[in-house]
Image (spheres, grey):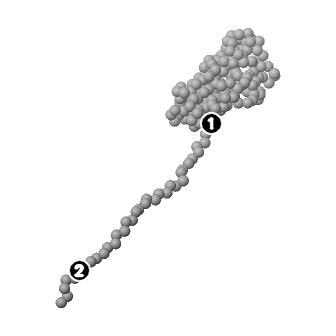
Amino acid sequence: MIGPSLLILFSAFSVINLRFVSAESKEASVNVTAACTMSTASITTHLYALSVNSYQEDLGKTKLTAICNDASGFVIYAIGFSGDTYGNTNMVNANGYTIATGTGANETTSNWSMKLVKDMDSYVPSNLGIESGYQNYKVIPANYTKVITYTARTTPESGAAVISSYAVNISGTQPSGSYTGKVKYTMVHPANEAAPEI
């Protein structure tokens, strides 16, 4: 007979230290470029028949729309651009006669001027400003002059609309004929302290 036996079992337990290993992907990165545009659209005709010794405001209304996603906003400069010459502030005639810029009504010399107003029928952000007194009729600038400022964006505003118009005074001695004059607008980044070059 076999007597009771002692069975001894040995178990080996090993301690395993688990380490959590992670890896990161490369970060996603995009560079959103500044996209700024400006467009114009006629609201009223730019061709008028005026008699001598007359003064007429609100001629040739043009809607100027600026759209820009630059977080710093934008600045718009204006300059007279008649006869295809930058800085020419005269209305010109094919026969060489001119109408100089000025703001006089019912004066003995002919003159023309410009004005800018916010287009309240369109989108107008609160931080859009008309500069240099151009809320009222003022001379056409001979050099690039800051006329509109759109300060830093604080909300996702998309654009701004302004109406440009002219006033013309015709003296009794102004030679008859067709006269033309225009203003060029240029948008720049507000970090540019200097006006555009002619």
Viewer-proximal residue among 90 and 125: 125
Say which residue appears at 60% left-offset and 23% top-offset. 130
Q: How crowded is mark 2: few (under 14 residues within 10 Å), some or many (20 or more)?
A: few
Q: Residue 37: which disc?
A: 1
The residue that disc 2 covers is 6
Label count reads: 2
Judge whether 151 appears above or below 104 on screen.
below
Q: Residue 11's x, y, as percent?
A: 32, 73
Q: Residue 171's x, y, as percent?
A: 73, 12
Residue 41 is left or right of residue 85, and the answer is left
Say which residue appears at 69% left-offset and 28% top-offset. 195
Q: Is residue 10 visible?
A: yes
Q: Using the rendered view, name the quadrant where residue 161 is placed.
A: top right
Q: Earlier in the sequence, mark 2 or mark 1?
A: 2
* Camera-nearest label, 2 or 1: 2
* Quarter of the N terminus within the rendering: bottom left
Q: Residue 77's x, y, as percent?
A: 66, 27
Q: Using the rendered view, name the quadrant where residue 94 is placed.
A: top right
Viewer-proximal residue among 176 and 59: 59
Say which residue appears at 43% left-offset and 60% top-offset. 19
Q: Label 2 to label 1, Cα distance in Å?
A: 95 Å
Say which residue appears at 65% left-offset and 16% top-offset. 56
Q: Is mark 1 on a helix, strand or loop?
A: strand
Q: Residue 192's x, y, as percent?
A: 66, 31
Judge whether 97 appears above or below 160 on screen.
above
Viewer-proximal residue among 149 and 107: 149
Judge whether 94 appears above or below 17 on screen.
above
Q: Residue 65: which disc?
A: none
Q: Using the rendered view, name the quadrant where residue 183 is placed.
A: top right
